[in-house]
Amino acid sequence: MDAVSGLLYGLSVALQPQNLVAAGVGVTLGSVVGVLPGIGPLTSLAILLPVSFYLDPTSGLILMAGVYYGAMYGGSTTAILLGLPGESSSVMTVLDGYKLRLMGRAGPAMTMAALASFVAGILATFGLAFLGVPLASYALAFGPIEVLALALVGVSLVVVLSANSLVKGTISACLGFLLATVGTDIISGVPRFTFGLPDALGGINLVDVVLGLFAVGEVLHALVKPEGDQGLPKGNWLDFRALIPSLDDLRVSWLPTLRQSVLGFLLGVMPGTGAVAASFIAYGTEQRLAKPDRAKLFGEGAMEGVCAPEAANNAAAQGAFVPMLTLGIPGSPAAAVLMGALIIHGLEPGPQLFQTNPDVVWGLIASMLIGNLMLIVLNVPLVGLFIQMLRIPFPALSVLTILLSVVGAFAVQNSLFDVLLVFLFGGVGLLMRLHGYPLAPLVLAMVLGPIVERSLYQGLLIAHGDPIQLVASPIPAVIYGILGLMLVLKLVQTVLRRGPRLAVEEDEGM
Amino acid sequence: MDLDRRAPRPDAGRLVSLGLYAGWILLGLAVVLASQPLRPPAGNFPTALGLVMAAAAAIGLVRELRRASPALDLDRERVVRAGIFFAALWALWLAVLWLGLAVGGILWSVVMLRFVYGWTIPRSFVAALILVVVLVVLFSALGLEIPPGQVAKLLGLAR
């Protein structure tokens, strides 16, 4: 199936009533989650993961994907209105967005952010459709050695890019891999690290870990380190006229939006880079590319300073689906959770998915077109309603989060063991957050753990036990080469950042 | 390494951070030990992971100790001695399990201590390493197993 017929087929799937409802609920929830600081897309994906069991795979995935990219839209709202990024990918939006609000131009800034996200979302969906097919057919030729290289590089890139400290990132990834080894061994059938508990024979459920780390852990972290009440800005947010941007806003923003949509998508396709990095890079490149008179406005209220990072983070969020759907390698923690949902439904993510379950793949891709349309409708005229969400006190939200986490964990297999694990991982998540351990490598490694172990075993069998063969063939050599380059760049960056004085006083690098 | 040049820092969290690193090391080593009875290939992957985890955490622990020393009132000598003691014990344990890796680990530790941190390698450390290699070769030639506690006593590292 080529991309055009795939998209048309996908639209026929995505337009089915249950899938439309799933997309609508997903993007609405995503917008709400994006607006609320402290409740991230991963928290909501974690809570929704058990819910998706009760839906068919296509609807479940459409719902969860909607939350993910919906949150990218919503994140800009609090960034502009409160100077507080709803999501970490909206940090750069604060710089100019909040300045625009202080200049009385919050409405146009929010509209432009939503429009940039929309354009990026649509372009990225087409990118996903047109890049996915050739990549998937190419990936069919991948054997265990190539898959191993991709999986290892995926985790390593997340470690390199998401952590301030390589040591902490490595520990987090190892912990994720180790959690994946608990239970009956996939190769030999031997029970491992089960402590004689029958409940542990089936392994540790991804749902428990994700709920614990991101939902319970987030709430505990907010209790330990409250961010304080930001308060709502005054203004009539339900007035549609206050939201219309000027022609000048459109003139200065269209090119940066298009440029950063493409760049963001390409960055999203690379496993590990993610929406946060994309938004930072987008802001930096636009500042450099801008004419001198516009460049000096960056940080002082430039409209393109809002559009560029918003376009990039949305495009990157959707770009992360490319490696997940085509190679079975999630490009971000959120994609890892979505991949977990696919696995729970008995589907194997990877190139075969395009052939075995075209309804799921194309339905998901086409639902992004519909979801983005829904988001622009939701986020421009109804932004005032979302702002009201900020009136919900955090204690109420946290109680709800804990409640949903417990119910969600118990619902997986009607076992209290899962609930206990959620609280255990909540504690682990809190400790890791407090001490600067990134959580993304843990989740990604846990999802990729079985793939890595199986590929390593099969790869070594093929190579007759010679580990050199695992890196000697062309594709893995190129993949590991890219990883090596990234590591060198990270080390150079660390050394440059540290400088001679910091080398003595601060050792945060590595 | 000049610890005296570092200003003391508030360290309530640092102690926990140190404890966390120690915990990760113990977890990594525990995984290595628990993987040994598993017949291959079930034990191979966790063994490798446990080792990587313990090694990463050991680096973190050393770095954290360097930063925490003034605030914890640990002088350099005590930190170095404690480090050497644990490194030697760890190297011993690895040597028993996996000679090749232990030698690699030792070499790596020496390079790290000498060239990265600029520490002078104490003679006792070098002596301990030579003793480890000799003992391992001797014990493996005799086909004996070495409980780490006894070896530590043998080396005078524990009582």
Image: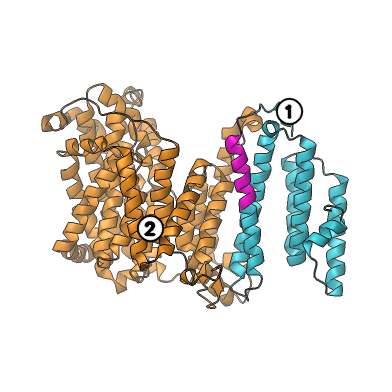
Chain colours: A orange, B cyan
Q: Quadrant of the C terminus of chain A?
A: top right
Q: Which residues are magenta?
A: B10-23
The quadrant the N terminus of chain A occupies is bottom left
Circles 1 and 2 on the same subunit: no
Judged by its main secondary structure, the magenta piece is: helix
A218 or A451: nearer the eye?
Answer: A218
Residue B5 percent across, percent down from the top left? 71, 27
**Residue with the mark numbered 2:** A337
Q: Residues within 10 Å of mark 1 (few under 14, many from 20)?
A: few
Residue at disc 2, secondary structure: helix
Q: Is residue A439 left or right of residue A295?
A: right
**SS at badge 1:** helix
Residue A252 screen position, x and y as percent: 25, 31
Chain containing mark 1: B
Q: Residue at x 86, y 73 (%)?
A: B141
What residue appears at the point 56 percent right and 52 percent down from the top-left corner?
Answer: A170
* Kind of residue at disc 1: Asp
Dot 1 corresponds to which residue? B4
Q: Relative to residue A457, is residue A483 depicted above or below?
A: above
Count of numbered badges drawn on the protein: 2
Whether residue B29 can be seen here:
yes
* Residue A49: % across, % down: 33, 59
